[in-house]
Image (cartoon, helix red, strand yellow):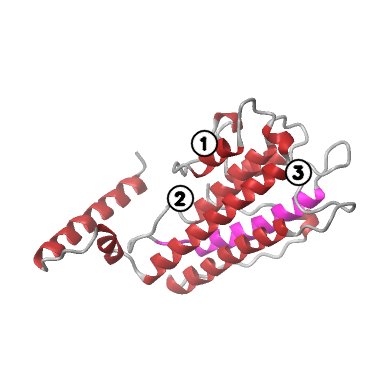
Amino acid sequence: MPASYLQRSIIKGTVGVWLLLLCTLSACSSSQNHLAKLAKTDIDMVADIHIHQSDELLRRLAGKLYRRNPRELHKIPGMTVEGRLAQLFGGDRSLLFSELDNQRGVEAMLLAFDQDYAGDRVFALLVGLVSMVHNAYGDNAEFFMFDSLDPQILYNSARNIEILVWRLKARTGADGKPLLLTNSLPDEAENLSFERLFGKLISLQDMMSAVAAQKWDRTVNFVVQRAATATFLPIGL
């Protein structure tokens, strides 16, 4: 078992004992939710909100991508959109799947743009994107007072989403068509809903990066890349 996991378990166990003692001494009758809030700082609550909003945006994006690219879902017999959503947001934040050779983060996203990849490109892209965003928050679904955030990873994940948006527009198959459809094609009615969702995700990551940098007095190395030659930045997965 990783040392970091043991440390977190010990810390959270200690917090639990401390809260129980505090509750007993003060004859506290508050709910369990109230007790949990005692172990949170303002930054923890802000992080919780960002995690929740990011997951909601990612869930909406997943549904839209499958509706726009139904052929990808059909590559997996018997699979449904609801089944994919359960895999992505069912509670297991590790997001390790044998059909992707247990790849996640940038490696999973790259599969989606590999012309030779025969699997579900939407799923590969989403596993990569969702796991990258989760990793930016330390794979935590909730934050407490002893947790911290790395503003550089949050910043890098925002830039990677920008690179992803460009690749979705620019990467094509042998037939010259986009490997995955998002916004409207030239002969279709204008549809920029994908860009809006991606834009909100980028804004959330950038905002949390700025908050974390100020909170823990850390410096973020800003990166400028040309879209056509940009490479995905490391995120620690």
Dot placed on the residue nearer the N-terminal end, 3 or 2: 2
Task: Check disc 2 and report the residue beneath it.
Answer: 139
Q: Mark 1: which amino acid?
A: Leu
Q: Is residue 229 left or right of residue 46?
A: right
Q: Residue at x 58, y 52 (%)?
A: 58
Alpha carbons under labels 1 and 3: distance apart:
22 Å
**Residue linked to disc 3:** 180
Image x and y of residue 59, in percent: 57, 50
| Residue 58 visible in the shown view | yes
Q: Amino acid at mark 3?
A: Leu
Tell me which secondary structure the magenta stretch mostly adopts.
helix
Viewer-nearest residue: 41 or 62? 62
Quadrant in the picture for the N terminus? top left
For residue 190, side relative to residue 2 (left or right): right
* Kind of residue at disc 2: Asp
Magenta span contains residue 168 = yes
Q: Badge 1: how crowded within 10 Å, few (<14), some, or many (20+)? A: some
Q: Position of residue 214 (x, y in %)?
A: 47, 74
Q: Secondary structure at mark 3?
A: loop
Is 35 inside the magenta-drawn segment? no
